[in-house]
């Protein structure tokens, strides 16, 4: 019937159960929050300064005596779109530093292996160096990238694959690698 009037059908399916579609995102931010120095001032969904701009930082942490924009990605699939989004948000919000937080999953580790050179250019501090910088009182002078395990799922939900990290240089991003 739709074809007769020149229309196509589009259908989307969403997981049942937990009503929050951003549950993974929430768990990722909780994992990042857990690795911040105790007492760090933390706010979520912080709007950009421009009036009428619908964009917001996933989080803003007060580190090194400055506000730091935090962007969390559960499963990035488009490196160029991610770079563009982060660059524009940083420019338009006026933050000095940016921390990119990615979920520590097998698919994200594959993405990181593929995008390693580009990420290193935008985020010179990664892995153990980035985690150490979070706890250093001095501004590192560059943006950071950290790989963070998702916090456990709420009751009745399956937990995401935390990734094994064996033989992968990005394993140093995980808080467990600091031990």
Image (spheres, rainbow, N blue to C red):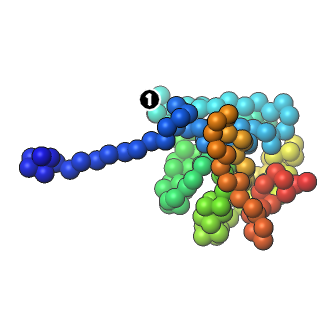
Foreground: 81 or 91?
A: 81
**Badge 1, how many Cα within 10 Å: few under 14, some, many 20+?**
few
Is residue 87 visible in the rendered structure shown here?
A: no
Q: In the displayed structure, does residue 28 sit left or right of residue 82?
A: right
What is the x, y in percent for residue 74? 60, 49
What is the x, y in percent for residue 4? 8, 49
What is the x, y in percent for residue 7? 16, 48
- Residue located 60% across and 31% down the image: 46
Q: Is residue 50 above or below residue 177?
A: above
Is residue 166 visible in the rendered structure shown here?
A: yes
Identify the residue at the far right of this view.
179
Identify the residue at the far front of this view.
156
Foreground: 158 or 110?
A: 158
What is the x, y in percent for residue 48? 55, 34
- Which image quarter: residue 117? bottom right
- Residue located 67% across and 35% down the image: 154
Under circle 1, the secondary element is loop
- Residue located 60% across and 70% down the image: 114
Q: Quadrant of the C terminus?
A: bottom right
- Which image quarter: residue 31? top right
Q: How many marks?
A: 1
Q: In the displayed structure, does residue 156 sit left or right of residue 132?
A: left
Q: In the displayed structure, does residue 143 sit left or right of residue 80?
A: right
Foreground: 149 or 13?
A: 13
- Residue located 62% across and 66% down the image: 110
Q: Residue under circle 1?
A: 52
């Amino acid at each position: 019937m739709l074809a007769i009037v020149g229309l196509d059908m589009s259908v989307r399916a969403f997981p049942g159960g937990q009503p929050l579609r951003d549950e993974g995102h929430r768990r990722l931010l909780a994992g990042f929050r857990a690795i911040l120095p105790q007492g760090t001032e933390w706010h979520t969904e912080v709007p950009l300064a421009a009036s009428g701009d619908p964009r917001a930082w996933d989080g803003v942490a007060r580190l090194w005596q400055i506000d730091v924009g935090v962007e969390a990605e559960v499963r990035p699939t488009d490196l160029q779109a991610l770079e563009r989004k982060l660059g524009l948000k940083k420019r338009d919000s006026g933050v000095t530093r940016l921390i990119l937080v990615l979920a520590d999953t097998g698919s994200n580790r594959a993405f990181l292996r593929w995008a390693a050179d580009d990420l290193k250019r935008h985020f010179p501090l990664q892995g153990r160096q980035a985690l150490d910088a979070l706890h250093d009182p001095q501004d590192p002078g560059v943006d950071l990238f950290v790989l963070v395990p998702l916090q456990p799922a709420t009751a009745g939900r399956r937990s995401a694959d935390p990734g094994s990290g064996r033989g992968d240089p990005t394993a140093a991003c995980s808080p467990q690698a600091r031990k």
